Amino acid sequence: MSRSTRAAGRRSAPRASRSKHRSQRARTTSKAIGLTLLSALVPGSGLIMGGRTKLGAFVLTITGGLLLVAAYVGLTQRNSVLELAVSPRQLLIATAAVVVLGVLWIWVVVASHKLLRPVTMTYTGRLAGSMFVGLLCFAIAVPTTVAAQTVMAQRDLVGSVFQSEDNSKSATRPKVDKEDPWAKTPRLNLLLLGADDGADRTGVRTDTVMVASIDTKTGDTALISLSRNWMRMPFPEGSPLHKIYPDGYWNPDLGNVEQPEFYLDSMYDNVPKQHPGALGATDNMGADVVKLAAGAALGLDIDYYMQINLAGFRKIIDAIGGITVNVSYKVPIGGDYGSGPGTRGAKKPSGYIQPGPNQKLDGYHALWFARGRYGLSDPSRQERQRCTIHALVNSVNPATLVTKYQQIASASKDLLRTDIPQEILPAFIELGMKVKGAKVANVDLDKRKNFPTGKNPDYSAMQELVEKAIAPKTKPIASTPSSTTTKKPGSGTTKKPVKATPTPGAAQDLNDACAYDPTQTGTN
């Protein structure tokens, strides 16, 4: 090859490279916009098509790697995800990671568009490209911001409501293995308190007292309601309060009469005032008092409590978009007998929740559905409270949590109190998932026999009923099913549902207990 030919080849090489570079940039504005969109969907692809092959391949590899790691962790490392969701420190790191990834994603989109846009562009084309890139950046920034705010809301909620075991005090909290809290706990007993500290109340009254006894393997739950007007609430032997009240919480000097200041709903406020420090170091002596008394009354060891302010309950219901319940009879909104019907201070209800199946209630009406009692009996009120909790559990789904989590967290953090430590929250979340898909039943304590009034309840008899209800069930021997004829929906007449009378001590499925039954009156 002659010297002149080799020189010509060397001169033509840069020209070929420049020609290739120009061909890459010689594309229409619309095509550049389309490729920019692709680079937003597949980060790194735009950099590769724009000539930054190594950088683009690196970004593409990192993106794919992050997606694979996220899929692996989500599918196989469930406990790690739960631990992340309830660790304030890890949630802070997660927030920073979300923000950094969002900023880098936006940078990749902007850089890709600069490489992909034509060398020469009209003013209209440049404006169109800039506007489109701006929209893409906005579309990335909004979910990034929402995700960061949601993670911070979760961190705020965990830090506000749940304290670490080292930073909180309880006189009744059990010691458990943090790695496997339920290893030696076949049933978890959780005290649920609805506290009313409204402007018309002196101190805090626990108008709602319930115990959820949960099978830690299956999630099957028995709900037990305690009447607010029970007297002589016992304390377990060995407790300092048992020494003070060996015959239960009441005043024998007053005789066998109603003693409202010695009702169950007054213990939370009165006992700590009457005997401060009796239980030792604790962050919430009132809750510890009720835990001990409720456990002794039912024959259970209460592990933890969850307390909600009733005004907060209303906000939480509104945050999830309401609950759906069956209203079998008129439920009063407000109303007060004062010292008796027609006496000073007596007020009639301002309205009623009318009967009807599958009614969607907002927070205000859900609260009165749960607490309304003017002209109605305490057992009917307790049943409505259980049905309200059942409806609340059924209303919370992944879609609701994702779209309304910030509102739920905001409503919860100032209105919930508990002695559940941060360290075992992952186990609680897993147990909660089991409960949502398991059987939730009501335990009937037989009011007519065991506490026709609240003055002297038969706690021993109720303990037997509770023990029977939560005892492990043996599988019945299979029998040959009788043939039945089923009608297609909508064909023929529909019979009015008949609600079976629950057997005392038997656990009645809440789906049955909360079914619509217009024959109910709410007065028995």
Image (spheres, rainbow, N blue to C red):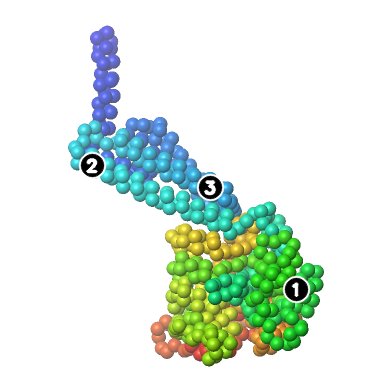
Residue 387 visible in the picture: no
Identify whether 138 is placed above or below 370.
Answer: above
Q: Amino acid at mark 2?
A: Leu
Residue drawn at the location 47% of the way across and 72% of the way down: 363
Kindly report the distance in space between the C-alpha atoms of the residues bearing marks 3 and 1. 43 Å
On the rendered image, what quadrant is the N terminus found in?
top left
Describe the element under mark 2 as helix, strand or loop. Answer: helix
Q: Quadrant of residue 433?
A: bottom right
- State the residue in front, 198 or 516: 198
Density class for disc 3 (Cα within 10 Å; few <14, some 14-19, many ≥20) is some
Identify whether 448 is placed above or below 292.
Answer: below
Q: Which residue is mark 3?
A: 92
Residue 460 drawn at (x, y percent): 75, 81
Residue 264 visible in the picture: yes
Residue drawn at the location 36% of the way across and 31% of the way down: 52
Kindly report the distance in space between the C-alpha atoms of the residues bearing marks 2 and 3. 39 Å
Q: Judge from the rendering whether residue 29 lies leftward or rightward of residue 64; answer left or right.
A: left
Describe the element under mark 3 as helix, strand or loop. Answer: helix
Q: Amino acid at mark 3?
A: Leu
Identify whether 152 is placed above or below 6.
Answer: below
Q: Which residue is mark 1?
A: 235
Identify whether 43 is placed above or below 439.
Answer: above
